[in-house]
Image (cartoon, rainbow, N blue to C red):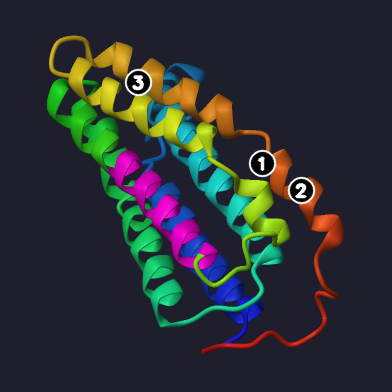
Amino acid sequence: MTTKRLEAFSDGVLAIIITVMVFKIDAPQESSFQALSAVIKPIASFLLSFIYLGIYWNNHHHLMHLTGRVDGLVLWANLHLLFWLSLLPFGTHWLNQAGIASATVVVYGTILLGAGIAYRLLCSAILRLEPRDSPLSRAIGHDAKGYLSLTLYVLALAVSMYEPIVSMVLYFIVSLIWVIPDSRIERAGSVIMDPSEPLDVE
């Protein structure tokens, strides 16, 4: 399997996740703006989840662009990431149905934390195959941005037992941190090999 095939598979799964998530939003039964106001909260939670999926799709694309080769561990690490992202429709739908409460926010935050850890593990699995001076290794570095995000997730989970609305604000802040694609990887992309060249798989 080449990195392009891995990326294409991941793109397909993410597209399905987004489709499932939007189907969870029930359209109003009445044709009035007042009836439309009833779905504002579900749309807001969908938007936050959509932004997160967009962030992972964007950064996953840049990550694969700089990845020289993949092996079995990378494939499983990628599936692990997709597992957590595939739970987002469930977490989002429960928020829509039950509202912002400790339990719903904890589940939603656990999914985000799981996805964040999974993405970090995917990066680690890829980096072990890369030379220390590779463009990807230099781009990721110590990944302070990634560890900051994980810290905010854990903080949000702790706060959610008392002030779940504060936790939702923290989740939104993390999305703002990542809404712009990782510039380190974008800059390093200029030195990657010809993307049309086949890549090796162990």
Whether residue 19 is visible to the viewer of this picture, yes or no, is no
Residue placed furthest toward the front: 132
For badge 2, the amino acid type reads Glu
Residue 148 drawn at (x, y percent): 44, 28
Circle 1: element type: loop
For badge 1, the amino acid type reads Asp
Question: Which corner quadrant of the image does residue 171 belong to?
Answer: top left
Q: CA gap, disc 1 to disc 2?
A: 6 Å
Q: In which quarter of the image is the N terminus?
A: bottom right
Q: Which residue is nearer to you in this view: 76 or 20?
A: 76
Give the answer, above or below, for where 79 lies relative to 117: below
Q: Which of marks 2 and 3 is nearer the N terminus?
A: 3
Labelled pair 1, 2 in contact (Cβ < 8 Å)? yes
Q: Which residue is nearer to you in this view: 144 or 52?
A: 144
Within the magenta stretch, is there residue 171? no
Question: Which corner quadrant of the image does residue 183 belong to?
Answer: top right
According to the picture, the residue beneath numbered tag 3 turns out to be 168
Q: Give the range drawn in magenta.
A: 111-127
According to the picture, the residue beneath numbered tag 2 turns out to be 186
Give the answer, above or below, for where 122 lies relative to 163: below
Circle 2: element type: helix
Residue 118 drawn at (x, y percent): 37, 54
Residue at the (69%, 84%) spot, across then down: 199
Main secondary structure of the magenta stretch:
helix
Circle 3: element type: helix
According to the picture, the residue beneath numbered tag 1 turns out to be 182
Q: Which residue is nearer to you in this view: 177 or 86?
A: 177
Give the answer, above or below, for where 108 lies relative to 151: below
